Image (cartoon, rainbow, N blue to C red):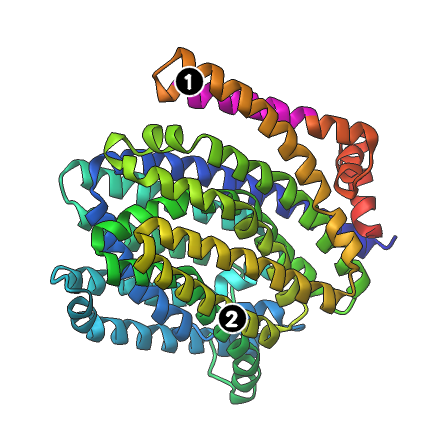
Amino acid sequence: MTSKSVSEARRVLRGFQWTYASVALQGILKLAALMILARLLTPHDFGLLGFALLCTNFVERIGQGGIGPALVQVERATSDIISSAWWMSILLGLLSTIVVALGAEYVAIFFEEPELESIIRLVSVGCLLEAMLAVPEAMLQRELRCREIMLADNLAYCIGMVGVCTTLAFAGWGVWSLAYAQVSLKAVRLVVIVGVAPAFKRNTIVWQHVKLLTRMGFGFSLGRLLNFFSLQGDNLVVGRLLGTEALGMYNRAYQLMTLPAMYVGQVFERVMFPAMARKQKETQRLATEFLLALEVLTLVALPSGVMMFALAPEIVLVGFGEHWRAVIPVVSILSFGVFFRTAYKCSDTAVRSVGAVYHYAGRQAVYSALVIGGAFVGALVAGVPGVACGVVGAVAINYVSMTCLAMKLLGARIAHVMRAHLLGCWASLWVIGGLSVSTHVLRMHSQNPAIVLFGSSVTALLAWCASVLLAVICVRFGSMRYLRNLLVNHRGMLTGFLTRT
């Protein structure tokens, strides 16, 4: 075991610790903000913001040109490469902001919402802000400085969503509270990341490096653009066919489905992408890490989907309020997509880390077509619940497709991939047993959804912990060996485990 390997393993471990702390804190803040804002704003307000973000996010995916991921992926980032990436990012950001501002009128006409024009022009400032932080954030990611990124994320969310948005919403600003929150969130994040990122020279653009970054970044950009349609295509269909209020309701329900992806999947994506990119030629080692990550993600995501399905009425009533009751069937349907939406982050990260950006883009093209097609058919047949069914089907197919691609690129065997799902299935059986008893008893004796939600959640957590404890004792799974090493020998043994795998 070399000192370099030990140092890198420790940096990855610290990255996981800080990133998970960040995601956990931001998840708590996000839940609090969702609960507060759902009682202060209407589905129509959330729908208007959804339209605005459709426009700005689409242009951002094109305008950023994949500069940030390309800078993380490149083997040696010289000062000239960093400088070229900086100027490219700024120029593309300015162009994106201008395009969004000029096209706002036509977007408002397309969605038949006159107020949308002014909202889009305000939110378009975010395109430039995102472009300005692309290079500093990529440099922090290259060095696995997750603590600084955590600080920026949570401070920005506190000030933007919890501070600015809730204050303006209480003051009666409606949808404008959401719009100003988006801009302030990105502005705060920019200030913090630029302040803590390594200093770099902003020289002139070197066209040789521009070609290198463009060649690498185009694949990332194409993949991100197609990923935009896979993530936002359903919103586009709902908003255009079913209206602004339906979009607001669907968007809130979809956010609940993505919470486990944020809590767990985002941790692996943020830390594992730069870590795996460093050893992109060591496919056997990457395969081991891929299987370990898949096992952990399954262990969390699969029971989370079970819990969301069983407690959908209580989650909506407690989280959003009585006037959001119509969202309950949508949440129930989307709960079937929790596992697929979270676990595909593992294969997604693995594929991008080895530089297979065009394979990734091809899969994203198919995924986007499935999402839009499924949402369109579902909207015509059954409204918002039909859209949810179509999207869950598309997410499931994409998970299988991306997992097969990761297996092919890393040389992983299908038997090992199937085995990585067993622990999550084992834990889910325990959670199902606990919830089937607790929800029946609590609903019989109490009409208060908060009591049912709290009691059933505690029961599900205890059942999950019991299943994990048995797995630790049996030591039948790779992630359980990982956990046992952590419990027995803490950092030193864990570092050795990481460097050997």
Q: Are marks 2 and 1 in contact (CB under 8 Å)?
A: no
Q: Could you say whether the residue bearing mark 1 is in a helix, strand or loop?
A: helix
Residue 212 lies left or right of residue 420; in this view the side is left
- Is 464 contained in the magenta span? yes
Mark 2 and mark 1: Cα distance apart in space: 43 Å
Which contiguous range is marked in magenta? 451-466
Compare residues 188 and 368 and report the one nearer the observer. Answer: 368
* Kind of residue sitting beneath label 1: Arg
Residue at the front extreme, as displayed: 381
The reply to whether residue 380 is visible in this rendering is yes
Mark closest to the chain's N terminus, 2 or 1: 2
The reply to whether residue 280 is visible in this rendering is no
* Kind of residue sitting beneath label 2: Val
Residue 435 drawn at (x, y percent): 54, 25
- Is residue 27 positioned above or below 456 on the image? below
Residue 320 drawn at (x, y percent): 30, 34
Residue 344 drawn at (x, y percent): 59, 55
Prevailing SS of the magenta stretch: helix
Name the residue located 44 percent from the left edge and 46 percent from the top edge.
334
- Is residue 195 positioned above or below 168 on the image? below
Residue 497 lies left or right of residue 351; in this view the side is right
Residue topped by disc 1: 443
Q: Could you say whether the residue bearing mark 2 is in a helix, strand or loop?
A: helix
Name the residue located 44 percent from the left edge and 58 percent from the top edge.
194
Compare residues 362 and 371 and report the one nearer the observer. Answer: 371
Q: Quadrant of residue 225?
A: bottom left
- Is 68 contained in the magenta span? no
Which label lies toward us, 2 or 1?
A: 1
- Is residue 19 positioned above or below 125 on the image? above
Residue topped by disc 2: 366
Residue at the bottom extreme, as displayed: 207
Name the residue located 85 percent from the left edge and 51 percent from the top edge.
500
